[in-house]
Amino acid sequence: MSTEPDQVETTGHVHGYTSEKSSHLKRLRRIEGQVRGLQRMVEEDKYCIDILTQVSAATKALQSFSLELLDEHLSHCVVEAAQKGGAEAEEKVREASDAIARLVRS
């Protein structure tokens, strides 16, 4: 089953990242702080190269988070679906492949 990003899955399924949720939220708050810092730097007319350095740091932090989340998805959601087999397994593999393609293009 595929859900839109703003929809909540109500099947009772526990997502792979759930056990690390507090750690993930802490990382995302840190990234949010980096982005707010970027906004502040622009508002204060900071030097372009300094801003670009911080953009690079925020981008790397998001990429690292993405890879960790993908790893958890593969080791939990995809493995679970593969054990069940059938259309759900095919769907989870397709979703993972699409996510990897998006990450590679970004």
Image: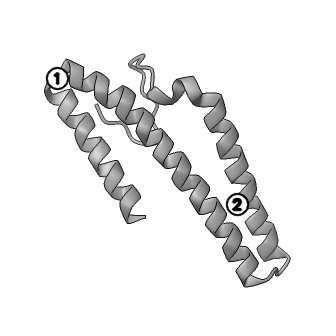
**Residue farthest along the left direction in this orientation:** 86
**Quadrant in the picture for residue 9:** top left
Taking the image as shown, residue 68 lies to the left or right of residue 75, namely right
Residue at the image position 55 percent from the left and 46 percent from the top = 65
How far apart are the alpha carbons under marks 2 and 1?
41 Å
Q: What residue is pinned by disc 1?
A: 85
Which quadrant of the view contains residue 51?
A: bottom right
Label 1 sits on what residue type?
Gly
From this view, report whether residue 52 is shown above or below residue 3.
below
Residue 97: x and y, percent? 27, 47
- Which residue is pictured at 42% across the width and 38% down the height? 71
Which quarter of the rendering shows the N terminus? top left
Q: Position of residue 14 (x, y in %)?
A: 45, 20
- Mark number, residue 67: none
As drawn, the label of residue 35 is 2
Q: Amino acid at mark 2?
A: Val
Q: Secondary structure at mark 1?
A: loop
| Residue at 65% over, 37% down | 25
